[in-house]
Structure formats: structure tokens, C-alpha cells
Image: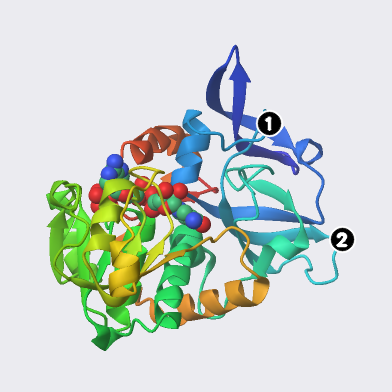
Amino acid sequence: MSRNRFKALLIEREDGIVRARLRKLVDADLPAGEVLVAVRYSSLNYKDGMAITGKGRIVASYPHVPGVDFSGCVLASENAEFKPGDEVVLTGWGVGERHWGGLAQRARVQAEWLVPLPRGLDLRKAMTIGSAGLTAMLCVMALEEAGVLPDSGTVVVTGAAGGVGSMAVALLAQLGYRVAAVTGRNSSHAFLRQLGAAEFLGREEMSRPPRKLESRRWAGCVDVVGGVMLARILAEMNYGGTVAATGLAGDDSLSTSMMPFILRNVCLRGVESVTPPRALRERAWRRLAELLPEQAYQAIGQEIPLAEVAAAAERIMRGEIRGRVLVDLEK
Ligand code: NDP
């Protein structure tokens, strides 16, 4: 390939139909930005699934390169903070949504969106973590801030076999929490046990509409599903428990009662990972680098080439992806 021709997954909209195809682009096709990065790995997140399959209103305009996160090496920089050769990671900031993203061999972005590759990680590990892992870490930190500690009781994780869920299970178990995993797939139990889950609950049982208050079961929760499952978990929280809610893989609505809040002091805490302040983002990355054991990366990450991303996007929308899908931009 000539020096500045590179492969990209380009989403185009024709006659109202969204199609994702592999294309060859040149640097001049990239949007304006301060830092040009040779992308080494990207990953597949739920939002990427929405963008690539044309579901939801994720993409601001077409043509578009999806990919909400990437890791790679700086090729050129107009910002003194980064120089060619620096290894960097990007998650969030609307990249892959409003700005062209990481599912291409090159990306041009603003310097403030990048973080230097955290010590203790390599480019592959950073993308095994990716947006999903950062979000899981921010949820765990939200529980800690709320006083939910390992001896508080069991923490329940919904959508446990998915990207955010599996990372949350691994992080919580590593910190010494007892973790209950809600999954719709019995075939994922062995995987989740390997990450440290101690108890399993079925999606169906946790999707039954709750009474206003149910028996107390949980000290904390990381929820990526929303809807009735979130309402059930709120009704099952211990006194003073906290739910860190960050996803809507099941439903973006929530119908609940005031009872868990006013009778059990329950806290529903939203967690957003797209634009957290840089200091918080860097703290979360440092903790991720310290906490995750080698075995977690091996169990959670699976690699695919760019050519397989469109098919994998259909699978993530059907809830069929287990753990994290890494996209190797050199294949
Ligand atoms: P994944 O598809 O990897 O995981 C979602 C999991 O949820 C699935 O694996 C499945 O787990 C479960 N699930 C899927 N559909 C349903 C359903 N209808 N009812 C109940 N459970 C279901 O996605 P991600 O982990 O990447 O993202 C999960 C959610 O978190 C998404 O809504 C995403 O937008 C959100 N998110 C939010 C961020 C933020 O900043 N707020 C950042 C990153 C993600 P199982 O098979 O175990 O049941």
C-alpha cells in the first residue's frame, strides 16, 4: 500500500439505507485535527454496532468512519503534548459518532481526546479494555465513592457476558467483591466464573416486573441493561445500596417506584464515559492497568480483522458477542 493510502470501514447512506464497506482512503480524506495516528487496534462496542447497522441516531453525517475507540502510534502532531512515535489511546469524545473514528488504519483527532498509553499496558491490552473497560472502571469507582465496599455485600452485574459487563465482573472480583452475574446465556457461566463471578441469575428471572419493594439482595449494581431489569434491581437493593447505571442494551426507559429511594436510601447513579474530565479518565486508566490480571485479557479479548467488523456489528446488536472484540488494523 502506498505511504498514505489506508484501509477504512466507511459507512455510507444511499436512498436511506446505511451500508458499511471497506474502502481505501488517503490522509487528505480525514477530517481536520491536531494529531494524526496510525491506528493499531480498535474495538467493537455497542454504539459501533448501532452506527454500522444504521440503528439509533449515532452517526452525525455520512460518509462516516465508525469506531468509538482506538490505540495506536502518533504519526504527526501539531500539538506540543504529542510527538511522532508516542503511543496513545482514545475513547469517547464523540469519536466514531460526530467525528471519524478508529475503524481505519489512520485517524486524525484533537490532542485533548488522547491519553498517553498508560504504564503497564500495551496497545492490544488498552483496546481489550477500550470504552467498555473504562466505563466498567468508572462504574466501580462510582460504587466505591458511594461507600459500596467488598464487605458491604454482593454486587450484581447485568449484561454480564458483554463488553462492559465482563469487564465489571473481572474488576469487581479482582477488588474482592462477591459478584452475581445476570446473563441471558447459560453457555457464558464458565467464562464468567473464570472472571470471578460467584453467582448466576438468568435474564428471564431478572426481567420479571417487580413489586414496589422486593427482598433485599444487593449492596451494589453495575447495570448496562436498563428497563424492567433495572427496576427489579432497584426494588431488590439493600438499605443504602447504589446502582451505577450506564447502558440500555435492553431498554432505554425506566418505570419504577419511589419506594426503594425513600424507604431504603437507594441511590441510582448515572455513569457516562464519553467526556469525563481528563484527571478522572487518567485515574481510571491507571487503576485498570494495575488491576486486571493477564488471564482476564486472555479470557475477555477476541481479535477480528477489519473485514469481519460489519458481521460482528450485527452480532453485537443481537447480544451475541461475548467479552470484547478487538479489531486488528494490521490484518
Ligand atoms: P454488549 O453487547 O457487549 O453487552 C451487552 C450485554 O447485555 C449483552 O452481551 C447481553 O449480555 C445483555 N443484553 C443484550 N440485550 C439484552 C436484552 N434485550 N435484555 C437484557 N440483556 C440484554 O454491549 P456493551 O457492553 O458494549 O454496552 C452495553 C451497554 O452499555 C450499551 O447500552 C452501551 O450503549 C452502554 N455503554 C455506555 C457507555 C456510557 O458511557 N454510558 C459506554 C459504553 C457502553 P448477556 O448475554 O450476558 O445477557
Towards the viewer: 238 or 150? 238
Residue 84, percent from left and from top? 77, 65
Towards the viewer: 262 or 108? 262
Q: Can residue 159 be seen in this view?
A: no
Q: What residue type is labelled 2?
A: Glu
Horizontal placement of 270 versus 187: left or right?
right
Figure colour scheme: rainbow
Q: Would you identify the image quadrant in which residue 177 lies? A: bottom left
Q: Which mark is residue 163?
A: none
Residue 303, percent from left and from top? 40, 51
Q: In this view, does 61 lie above or below 140?
A: above
Mark 1 is surrounded, within 10 Å at the Cα level, by few (under 14), some (14 to 19) or many (20 or more) other residues, namely few
Q: In this view, does 309 lie above or below 238?
A: above
* Residue farthest along the top direction in this orientation: 15
Horizontal placement of 87 versus 135: left or right?
right
Residue 138, percent from left and from top? 48, 70
Q: Mark 1 points at which residue?
A: 61
Describe the element under mark 1 as helix, strand or loop: loop
Disc 2: residue Cβ within 8 A of ligand 1's nearest atom: no
User: What residue lies at 53% left-to-right and 23% top-to-bottom?
Assistant: 19
Q: What residue type is labelled 1?
A: Ser
Q: Can residue 304 be seen in this view?
A: yes
Q: Distance between the residues labelled 1 and 2?
A: 26 Å
Q: Mark 2 points at which residue?
A: 78
Horizontal placement of 198 versus 3: left or right?
left
Residue 118, percent from left and from top? 57, 76
User: What residue lies at 31% left-to-right and 55% top-to-bottom?
Assistant: 257
